[in-house]
Image (cartoon, grey):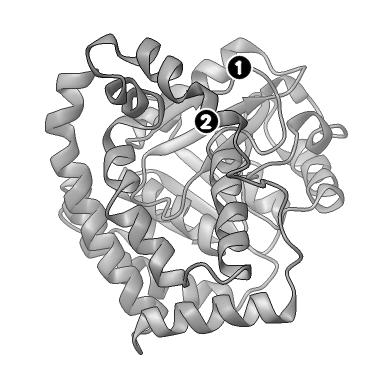
Amino acid sequence: MSSNITKVAVIGTGVIGAGWIIRALAHNKQVIAFDKNIKLEKKLIKEIKRTWPYVKKLFNKKKLNLNKLKFVDSIKEAVKDADFIQECVTENYSLKTKLMHGIGKYAKPNAIISSSSSGLLPSRIYSKCKNPKRTMIGHPFNPVYILPGVEIVTGKKTQKSYINKAKNFYKSISMNPLLVKKELPGYLADRLQEALWREALHIINEGYASTEDLDRAIENGPGLRWSLMGIFLTYHLAGGKAGMKHMLEQFGPALKLPWTKLKAPALSKKLSSRIIKGTRKQAKGKSVEKISNIRDEYLVSLLKMRKKFENKLR
């Protein structure tokens, strides 16, 4: 998919911002980066070099061109010439609203402004942004430089023409944009992840399993199925020849059983300690960087393999 967007500004160069930068560079975009913490520049360059072997393999790129990346020392300098602006700062309404006011003030009138927020409402984030018709959420998934999903969530004033331009841009950097039909907190995938996370906390808190037990339960069971066909098609197969119809008839009554709690338990010192100790034990002395490398290598291999089967399903 081609896009006439060539110059991308990324505001905030932490984990998510760095992911966007790496992905954009892998698709020959010119990137202008800004972060109030100037010390993150060296950290970002290190992360780009760490991840490039996986990005290179996934997107069949020959070499890294860091000349396409430019750091600037102000938001104005970052956004003034950008065609597309991806914001990646802390999840806080007050902070993002103030930031978007500044971005809207300095950005070109037709530049698309997208927030990487993982759950905040765009209508609130952009309430003070100039020309809100070009604003939206572009919620990615970590690691952004590998995972193709991005949820587009629009506000009440977002215009369709800008949504289409954003979709084309995301496709041009090998992403699979999904337009959320209505504005809602948490969007789609994070609401599902949050429900699973809350249940996991209860199970740990009540001593039924360790963190490793729960990870293995997902890794060796539903996680393998979900990576290809998600939730609903998985349950469709559970119904046999009659599919979802039989599945609902047979397992629907179980929805009334008190199996889940959904409301999160208090994150007490005891629960926090169990989770921290449990994940440290799982890491077996490996650094976060080492585990990230293993994850990235696996995800690249998985995505390449999945393409063969996706074509048969979709």
Left of 200 or right of it: where is 127? right
As helix, strand or loop, the secondary structure at mark 1 comes to: loop
The count of marks equals 2
Position of the N terminus, as image quadrant, is: top left
Q: Residue at x 31, y 78 (%)?
A: 290
Which x, y percent locates residue 20?
A: 46, 50
Q: Amino acid at mark 2?
A: Ala
* Residue toward you, 111 or 157: 157
Q: In the rendered image, which residue does mark 1 sit on? A: 181
Other-residue count near label 1 (Cα within 10 Å), few / some / many at <14 / 14–19 / ≥20: few
Residue 274, located in which quarter of the rendered image?
A: bottom right
Q: Residue at x 52, y 63 (%)?
A: 15
Q: Is residue 44 visible?
A: yes
| Circle on res. 262 | none
Residue 108, located in which quarter of the rendered image?
A: top right
Report the Cα–Cα distance between label 1 and label 2. Answer: 29 Å
Q: In the rendered image, which residue does mark 2 sit on? A: 254
Is 260 drawn above or below residue 130 in the view shown?
Answer: below
Which x, y percent locates residue 107?
A: 70, 37
Left of 19 or right of it: where is 186? right
Q: Residue at x 47, y 72 (%)?
A: 210
Q: Is residue 49 visible?
A: no
Q: Amino acid at mark 1?
A: Lys
Other-residue count near label 2 (Cα within 10 Å), few / some / many at <14 / 14–19 / ≥20: few
- Disc with the residue nearer the chain's start (1 vs 2): 1
Q: Residue at x 83, y 34 (%)?
A: 124
* Residue toward you, 283 or 163: 283
Which x, y percent locates residue 298?
A: 22, 58
Residue 71, located in which quarter of the rendered image?
A: bottom right
Residue most toward the bottom?
285
* Residue toward you, 65 or 172: 172
As helix, strand or loop, the secondary structure at mark 2 comes to: helix
